[in-house]
Image (cartoon, rainbow, N blue to C red):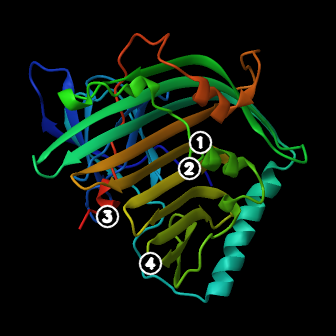
Amino acid sequence: MNPIYAILFVFHLVAINGTAQVTIKVLNQTDSLEISGCICTNQQNQILDISDHKGNLNLSKNNIYILVHPSFYTLKIDQLKNDSVVYLQPLVREIEEVEIVSTTNEKLFGLVIQQYRNDLVNSTRKGTLNYKNTNWFTYDYFEEQKQDSAFCAIENTLSFEVDQTKKKTKILFSPIELNRYCSPFSFPENADIKTAEMSGFSRFDFSRFLNAIFTEGSFFDEIGFTHTQTTKKVDDQNKTTELKFLNEGYEKTIVFSAIDSSLLSYKYQFTGTKGWYHVYFATFSSQEVQTFYEEKAYLFDYEKQNHLFHSVHYGNFQTNEKIQATTLKPFAEIIKDQSTQNSTNEIEPLFPRHKNYLIPRN
């Protein structure tokens, strides 16, 4: 079952005179609650904004936009002219939850993921990946009650190729366009910190999640933790099913078609006890991953300050048999080698949207 674009939306008749900016408020069609973390891209799959906790997006007039969220059907908006309220249709409506035993949920989860793997086993896929990442470096000064922050952002277009027919699947990339921009810290005491020299790659890099989607036997294929609560929702109207697994600090959810068991979305989030969190999701169409999102944060406590690191990633795959004929490499290798030397344009950063999960200092 593929996501659909023809979804109800309502425009407020409130014009903004003399400005090219409009505001969209994204709401749930079922209960009219705000939807945070809704990603907005243009037709070129360039990420423009992510809705805040009030569901707001700030955009330009007279453009075409696409809204993506793991719990809702994708929505396309044509030629936005005024401030608007947009309603997204949930993949699974808020109906009574039916709790089933853990072993049944685990078995059904495994069957859905195995069906996904079986549908890809003899396939090859080529195309482009539009990818954006921002790493935020923040210092909170307790005594002075002030904060200093800087960021490094990259915005890339990569060709990709993945061959599922081989015994060990690898997804490989080659750069089409690479851009990286780093901002400095503001306070004089941090002036000697060279953000451009900070590594944009680590063993926690999101390529682990990216590779997992394509590689059988990865953590993507497993529930990944001992769950204490399991729920199953069946939406007869949308012909979809949701499985959710919960434990303290952990939540994993998949939504799939009740007709053919094809994946629609996959989301996993967890929080630690010492100041960190991790959220990621992927959306699918015809058993092919279409978009992915990852956000993570770490909090380091010092005597007089907190050091926070936030990282936000977003990507969109477009299948196209014509790819750039250059040397293909693993994603992590390209990102690790990417520098600011050839980047002259400032990049609009991606802001953390889930930082409320970060456990504060006592």
- Between the residue at mark 3 and the residue at mark 4, the CA separation in whole angstroms equals 14 Å
Q: Residues within 10 Å of mark 3 (few under 14, many from 20)?
A: some
Q: Nearer the viewer, residue 261 or 171?
A: 171
Q: Is residue 47 left or right of 328 when viewed as pictured?
A: left
Q: Identity of the amino acid at label 3?
A: Ile
Task: Name the residue carrying label 4.
Answer: 248
In the rendered view of the protein, which quadrant contains the C terminus? Answer: bottom left
The picture quadrant where one finds residue 136 is top left
**What element does badge 4 sit on?**
loop
Q: Identity of the amino acid at label 1?
A: Gln
Q: Is residue 66 above or below residue 278?
A: above
- Between the residue at mark 1 and the residue at mark 2, the CA separation in whole angstroms equals 6 Å
- Mark 1 or mark 2: name the one nearer the start of the chain: 2
Q: Is residue 152 above or below residue 269?
A: above
Nearer the viewer's eye, disc 2 or disc 3?
Answer: 3
Q: Could you tell me residue 105's position as x and y percent? A: 64, 80
Q: Is residue 287 left or right of 201 when viewed as pictured?
A: right
C-beta proximity under 8 Å, tags 1 and 2: yes
Residue 70 badge: none
- Between the residue at mark 2 and the residue at mark 3, the CA separation in whole angstroms equals 28 Å
Q: Nearer the viewer, residue 243 or 186?
A: 186
**What element does badge 1 sit on?**
strand
Task: Name the residue carrying label 1.
Answer: 290
- Mark 1 or mark 3: name the one nearer the start of the chain: 1
Task: Name the residue carrying label 2.
Answer: 283
